[in-house]
Amino acid sequence: MKYQCDNHQKCMKMIQAVLDGSASAEEIEHFKQNMDVCMPCIETYKLEKCMKEAMQEKVEKKCCPEKLVLDIKAKIGLSLLVLGFIAVEVKLYSIFFSC
């Protein structure tokens, strides 16, 4: 049993992938084979799993009202349009006033 993880960042990403369901079958199998030999990974996995389960039990999932979704999309669209105009103005400014 290891009491210090040599690949902590990589292991954290793998634990998250396994818990959120984005890991491939090969990654899950590799994780299962290697998790039991690293105490920090075992503890991190258990903690992350408990936190995820607690959040799923406590958080109530509700749908957004369609009007709110449309309002957000409209505001994003308007913001992108304004940013586009600003980008054009900056480009024109740089063309006309560059030395």
Image (spheres, helix red, strand yellow):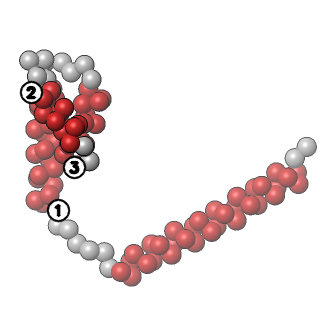
| Residue 96 in the image, given as x and y percentages of width and height | 88, 54
Quadrant containing the C terminus in the rendered view: top right
Q: Amino acid at mark 3?
A: Gly
User: For numbered disc 2, what is the local secondary structure?
Assistant: loop
Q: Nearer the viewer, residue 61 or 21?
A: 21
- The image quadrant of residue 90 is bottom right
What's the amino acid at mark 2? Asp
Image x and y of residue 54, in percent: 11, 53
Reading the image, the residue beneath label 3 is 21
**Label pair 2/3, CB-CB below 8 angstroms:** no
Q: Say the numbered circle drawn on residue 36.
A: 2
* Number of numbered tags placed on the structure image: 3
Q: CA distance from mark 2 to mark 3?
A: 20 Å
Work out whether 12 lies above or below 20: above
Residue found 81% across the figure and 58% down from its top: 92
* Residue projecting furthest to the right: 99
Q: Which residue is mark 1?
A: 59
